Image (cartoon, coloured by chain):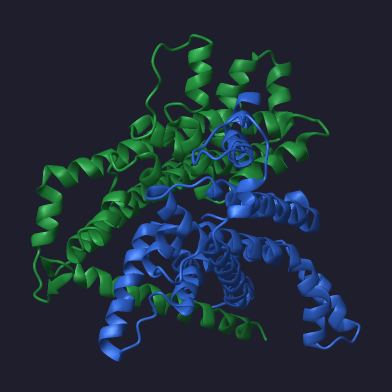
Amino acid sequence: MKARWGWLVVPCLVATGTLLFASQAVFLRISFYRDRGFGRVEPDVTLANYLRVLQDPFYLQSLALTFEVAIAVLVCSLVCGCPAAYILARMRSRWTPLLLGAVIASALVAEIIKVLGLVVIFSADGVLNRSLLAIGLIDAPLRLLGTVPGVVIGLLHFTLGFVILLMFGVFQTIPRSLEEAARVHGASRLRVLWRIVLPLSLPGMVAGGLVVFNLSMGSFTAAALLGGGRILTMPVLIERTMVLETRYAIAACMAAVLMSSVLLVNVAASVVLTRRRAGAVA
Amino acid sequence: MIALYGFLFAPLVVVAGASLAGGERPYVSFPPDRLSFEWYGRIPARYVESIGLSVLLAGATAVCALALAVPAALGLVRGRFAGREAVALFLRAPLQIPFIVVGIAFLQLYYALGAAVGINPRGRFVGLLLGHVFLTTPYALGTVTAVLQRFNRRLEEAARTLGATPWRTFRRVTLPVIMPGIYAGALYAFIVSFGEVPVALFLANPRVATFPVELFGALQFDFNPSLLAVSTLILCLSLAIIVVFQRIIGIDALLRATAGRDP
């Protein structure tokens, strides 16, 4: 009886496996083909695309920009999301479910609709600039559309909800009694946060941080629309190379480079985490 | 906290508010000087069509993703076979691939299929469906697995002892208990499929385009306030769906599902 349960995995494994291997094999093979432009590739295997993407400052800058944006989003969403999640996890109020529900709802609304709202807010004569000008905080309209901060804010909007929900789950598993015990023994609130809450939630923060990093590295919608064609992160550049320039082999190569960088960071993070955990046990 | 919620909801409020602005001017004004629903009457037919396609696609995606994920979750949680951990890791692999890469990889696959056997699923419903099922199955697998892991097998043993057949046990005991995971998985699959741009952008064509792809194109090339009106309708619909789901499966299950949606 027990042995039979295992077979239920097969359909899913076959479906995911076929689609994964077929699509990856085709696109990775094309990334090694010679690119003739205008949607034509020549099927002779060469490293030329990779050499070009990894040497040309244009592509390297785009890769560096993608990392910068992703790291900025990662830091901002942890800095904003963790305190909020901690407050939500520790407050004993009948409003908590409503507040959590609001975060879930905002996290699940289609990204493109949120981006549309942000475009309206950010535009030169938009709400943000008019209110800031009115209260005299700025003299000239802020330019957020087509700038890196604008893209970071847009991505932050996309990731923040998930960080709050993830970290809420993490903080909930830390028993209140631990913090109370530390307080009884004379630790200040700050010390409790620093010595108890932070170490216990660190693995959760790393996991949440990785999710944000992955989402930001691959984010296309917000970067394309809020960047206004001026902020060329890798996903934006890949789409352009594919659709506007129809250089399929180069686009495939860039996609492969992006995917490998994301995988590399994830593997590195998991290796460091396992080492740490092993060290803590020993 | 107030600032945070303000930040999370400001774009949604602005979209809804600006959609109500009256007047002939084809540009956005927020706060609106005068309220009217006139842009709602001028929603172009192609957006309505694309919404129909998106709803159909997202529904079909949710059904297919669950049809794959529910048995797989049962197999992963209850099966005892070598390499189970590796299989679980492998089935989560699509989550690690950036969406844009999935899009480009599937497009190349479809071109290759077209060249090899003459069937190019690009710009067809089935092409979009395959891509979205690939994307969303890991989410559904995550939510169902999370519920199954906490499932108490004694309940099933009790049912069997009392004379229920295995199928009856599954239908009357197991299924109701794992239902929250199934609902949450369906919700996620639907939401991801319904809102996603980078994969559909590559797999759609001008005749068969999902709503986010239409909206993306319009935002880049021809903006029109009726977009705000459509978006507001979608926004209200999504919020209503999410509230209904929160009522059905409870906020805790939805929360666990959200938190457990990534490895």
Q: Quadrant of residue B204?
A: bottom left
**Which residue is located at x 40 percent, y 76 percent?**
A19
**Which residue is located at x 42 percent, y 41 percent?**
A276
Percent position of residue B201, x then y: 40, 62
Position of the N terminus of chain A, as image quadrant, is bottom right
**Which residue is located at x 83 percent, y 34 percent?**
A94
Percent position of residue A55, x then y: 10, 48
**Residue B219 visible, this orientation:** yes
Percent position of residue A162, x then y: 56, 44
> Which one is in front, A170 or A64?
A64
Q: Quadrant of residue B247?
A: bottom right
Q: Is residue A176 above or below residue B244?
A: above
Percent position of residue B180, x then y: 74, 62
Q: Is residue A241 left or right of residue A194?
A: left
Q: Is residue A207 above or below residue B112?
A: above
> Which one is in front, B171 or B204?
B204
Q: Is residue A189 above or below residue B199?
A: above
The extreme front residue here reads: B24
Q: Which shade of the palette goes to chain B?
A: blue
Q: Is residue B57 left or right of residue A43?
A: right
Q: Is residue A262 left or right of residue B182?
A: left
> Which one is in front, B17 or B95?
B17
**Residue B259 visible, this orientation:** no
For the colour green, the matching chain is: A
**Which residue is located at x 71 percent, y 56 percent?**
B241
Give the number of callouts.
Answer: 0
> Which one is in front, B135 or B197?
B197
The extreme bottom residue here reads: B117
